[in-house]
Amino acid sequence: MLNKFFGTKQFYKHLILLMVPIMIQNGITNFVNMLDNIMVGQVGTVQMTGVAVSNQLIFVFNLCIFGAISGAGIFGAQFYGKGDHKGLRDTFRFKLIFCVALTLLCIGIFLAFGENLIGFYLKGEGNPEDAALSLMYAKKYLFVMLIGMVPYTIAQCYSSTLRETGQTVVPMVAGVAAVVVNLSLNYVLIFGKLGAPKLGVIGAAVATVISRFAELIVVAAWTHLHKIENKFIIGAFKSLKIPSRLCGQIIIKGLPLMINETLWAAGVATINQCYSVKGLNVVAATNISTTFYNVFSVAFLAVGMSIGIILGQQLGAGKSANEVKATARHSITFSVLLSACIGIIYAIISTFIPHAYNTSSEVKFLATGFMQIAALTMPIEAYVNAAYFTLRSGGKAFVTFLFDSCFMWCINVVTAFILCNYTALPILTIYLICQLLNLIKAIIGFVFIKKGVWIKKIVSD
């Protein structure tokens, strides 16, 4: 029984070597976002609410890019697994062309409809003057953040391709460099230190945009200066031609994944909009809770990304179904146990975290409640996340879609909408119910994984 759910020392060494740099990069990034959030929270609740709403829209964009990159990344990991550098190079080109075009489209949407999208989150109970001020701050923050979207996208194309080859340290270093720049400039620009103007919310956005450029410079420079280790980059820009057959395969397998990620992110944003019906205090409280949850969830999210890389490489190398299944089972067990330990720590400190903010006692109470519920359900989230990356590794787009975004919109969103708009239940009870719905999703994931429907090599010999 132990051998069934726990792997060898060599297995854990391989998994940890992959996940730790990803975890450090995402952890530091989310930690700085947390400090950024606290700094803005020191300015005032209205400003914090405005930034939180804008970040909901940016979150959807980020997941859209992540989905597009991940769709192509399924092929990248399998190409690398079978030693095909040309295939990896073509996959990298596809990422760049498609994702930059997608970014420009998203920028156009935000410029045209940004104010209307922000307004959906500010219709709940509360002071109308506060809502108007939050709208103003949200618009200013969002329009500055648009400048950093293109460098962010290009950096993600480089970083994801490096991770597919097992190079996780360099993206981590680039992320750390971006974090240092962001944190330093946040302090200077938000509060007007070292002779700089006091820009508040705008300062937070400017610091983030500059950090996006810093991350791109580091990851791109290292990749091009180390061509021996990164053979895919040799001649990558001599031509933008991508074999039509591969392009078609990536679109068939990858586009559904991008749509899935986008729909899932939009579902999360829609659920938060449903919560906002219960008042502006709920918007501020969910912002605090989500910011800190992002810091504590980096471990199981990193395990999930590592699962996708390891299984993709094994499938590309033609490993047996039993071996691939065992790897998935060992990885998922590790992820759930790790998140259970972290969840206990998160629950303990949740009482103290909200007091770092300059906000009302009601917001602090709600934020603590949200965090304690999130800590309780963290192992469920970890299992669902690991199951998602497992199903995705074999390019089973339709199965992934059913498991992820279809469940999100048919179950999570519908439940949140009904409970928030047609019942008098308190927001914390509604939040608990919505979180526990993922138990159903975990059972579905277990069935899919056990059947092995995801085990498929999608790159040709």
Image (spheres, rainbow, N blue to C red):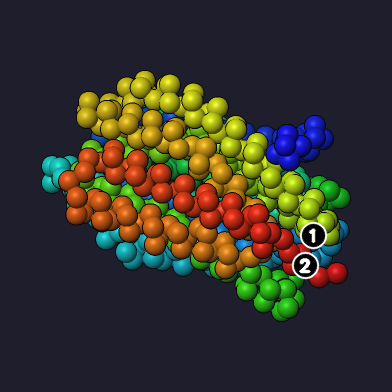
Is 249 placed above or below 327 here?
Answer: below
Is 303 placed above or below 353 here?
Answer: below
Quarter of the image with the N terminus in it: top right
CA–CA distance in space, label 1 to label 2: 7 Å
Rendered location of residue 388, percent (x, y): 58, 53
Rendered location of residue 143, percent (x, y): 37, 53
Residue at the location (33% across, 66% down)?
112
Query: Identity of the amino acid at label 2?
Result: Val
- Number of residues whose C-alpha sits closer than 10 Å to that of mark 1, classed few (under 14), some (14–19) or many (20 or more): many
Let me know if residue 103 appears in the view.
no
Is 452 placed above or below 22 here?
Answer: below
Residue at the location (39% across, 62% down)?
410
Residue at the location (76% across, 37% down)?
3
Camera-side residue: 439 or 227?
A: 439
Residue 459's disc is: 2
Residue at the location (55% across, 33% down)?
339
Rendered location of residue 194, percent (x, y): 43, 25
Q: Residue furthest left?
A: 128
From the viewer's perspective, tell me whether residue 383 is left or right of residue 58: right
Residue 316's disc is: 1
Which element type, helix, strand or loop, lies under badge 2? loop
From the viewer's perspective, tell me whether residue 192 is left or right of residue 361: right
Camera-side residue: 95 or 402?
A: 402
Query: Identity of the amino acid at label 1?
Result: Gly
Question: Residue 365: which quarter of the image?
Answer: top left
From the viewer's perspective, tell me whether residue 211 is left or right of residue 423: right
Rendered location of residue 123, percent (x, y): 19, 52
Quarter of the image with the C terminus in it: bottom right
Asked if disc 1 and disc 2 are in contact, CB closer than 8 Å, the reply is yes
Which element type, helix, strand or loop, lies under badge 1? helix
Camera-side residue: 382 or 202?
A: 382
Nearest to N terminus: mark 1 or mark 2: 1
